[in-house]
Image (cartoon, rainbow, N blue to C red):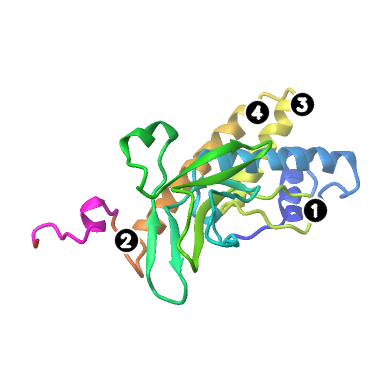
Amino acid sequence: MRLSVSDIMTRVASTVNQEADSPESTSTEFALWLTFLNRSQDEWSESSDWEVTRKFFKPSVVGVSVASVALPLDFKNLAGPARLHFGSTTIVEEVPFINDEQKSFFSSTDKLVTIVGDTASGKSLVFSPGTLASGASVQITYFSMPTALSTASQFPTVPDPSFLIDRTIAYILEARSDPRFQLMESKARERLLNMAQMATEDKYSNYSNPNPVSNSMRRAGFRVGRD
């Protein structure tokens, strides 16, 4: 189901105002509901690292001395190791992420990355050692934060808009001191859990391409029962 902000507002209005039309986009009621809608989207975003928010970032590398790379403002979490591509070859080297406290477990020549910074000043990916081979380019896969909704014609990233509808209704009813908000909160929570289950099944149990969970043995090229 693909619904725009306007469609979502109409469905919210059918419950809270018992009207088939959403508030005017220039009204204060629309602005208030839009705030609740964005809060609902943020709640969905923070509940998990969703596959639909996965993005690829290829920063420009000037020269070979690169100690850190500024991450995009919508960066949330890494979705995999940093990948180094060498020129026009097919060689790809994966550089793992570690916590800063783990640095003592590695030597000064081990390639690894850490993350520094915060959401206010921005985050950066720090490479150790701080140099890259000539001709190398970087690819960073990350989970992003969704863009705030601001117009009636936008389409939310959330796979199930019904969650946004129920959660927005809950916020509105709670603001009106209507005890029915608890029921709508419960419905929204069930939809959120169902989205999480469906996301897992779509990734690992897809009928067209089953993708069982991998482990370190598989990544190293070992096959259980054969090697």
Residue 51: x and y, percent? 49, 54
CA gap, disc 2 and disc 4: 41 Å
Which residue lies under the disc numbered 4?
Answer: 180
- Label 1: state its secondary structure: loop
Q: Which circle's residue, 1 or 3, is located before the other in the chain?
A: 1
Q: Is residue 23 left or right of residue 168?
A: right
What is the spatial separation of the Cα atoms under label 3 and label 2, in whole angstroms? 46 Å
User: What secondary structure is found at the residue carrying circle 3?
Assistant: loop
Q: Earlier in the sequence, mark 2 or mark 4?
A: 4
Between residues 35 and 7, which one lies in front from this camera angle? 35
Q: Nearer the viewer, mark 3 or mark 2?
A: 2
How far across and down, in percent of the image, does residue 13 sit? 77, 44
What label does residue 151 carry, if any?
1
What amino acid does circle 4 point to? Arg
Q: Which one is closest to the eye, mark 1 or mark 3?
A: 1
Say which quadrant the N terminus sits in.
Answer: bottom right
Q: Residue 176 — which label?
A: 3
Judged left or right of residue 203, residue 11 is right
Ranked by sequence position, the earlier of labels 3 and 2 is: 3
Question: Which residue is tagged 2?
Answer: 211
The front one of 39 and 130 is 130
- Taking the spot 44% from the left edge, 34% from the top edge, the residue there is 100
Name which of mark 1 and mark 4 comes first in the sequence. 1
Q: Secondary structure at mark 4?
A: loop
Amino acid residing under circle 2: Asn
Residue 210 image offset from top left, x and y in percent: 31, 64
Residue 21 percent across, percent down from the top left: 82, 51
